[in-house]
Image (spheres, rainbow, N blue to C red):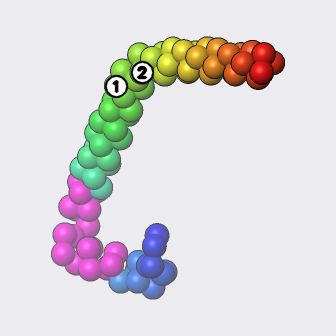
Amino acid sequence: MLFISGPEIVIIFIVVLLLFGSKKIPELAKGLGKGMKEFKKATDDIKKEIHNNSGGIVEDFKDIKKDITKDTQEIVKNVKKKMDTD
């Protein structure tokens, strides 16, 4: 963890034990685990959705790159031709 050392974790654990009791802690941990699982599932779904929808954009950029490369080669060819005739 960031700036929490061993003794601080023990103190936090003791405070949680005193506040909630030994019977409630497993229920809290179970609820926390379910919440983390749902959060991870939601973030994975969002990542998949972004990845699935970005496929068209990648193809568009590839087409633009091809067009730019073609135009650049044509310009270079015309410049060389112009320089050879002068």
| Mark closer to the chain start, 2 or 1 | 1
Badge 2: few (under 14), some or many (20 or more) residues near its Cα, within 10 Å?
Answer: few
Q: Residue at x 70, y 22 (%)?
A: 79
Position of residue 71 measured from the top left corner of the image (x, y, whole percent): 58, 17
Badge 1: few (under 14), some or many (20 or more) residues near its Cα, within 10 Å?
Answer: few
| Kind of residue sitting beneath label 1 | Glu
Within the image, what quadrant is residue 34 found in? Answer: top left
Residue 43 seen in the figure: yes
Range of residues picked out in magenta: 12-28
Q: Magenta span has 16?
A: yes
- Give the label on residue 69, or none: none
Tell me the distance, in whole angstroms, between the alpha carbons under discs 2 and 1.
14 Å
Q: Does 15 sit above or below residue 22?
A: below
- Give the label on residue 49, or none: 1
SS category of the residue bearing label 2: helix
What kind of secondary structure does the magenta stretch mostly adopt?
helix
Q: In the displayed image of the protein, which residue is found farthest to the right?
A: 84
Find disc 2 in the rendering and name its residue: 57
Q: Which residue is drawn at 21% across and 70% down?
A: 21
| Kind of residue sitting beneath label 2 | Ile
Q: Does 19 sit above or below residue 73?
A: below
SS category of the residue bearing label 1: helix
Between 71 and 11, the residue placed more toward the observer is 71
Q: Residue at x 50, y 19 (%)?
A: 64
Position of residue 11 measured from the top left corner of the image (x, y, whole percent): 35, 83
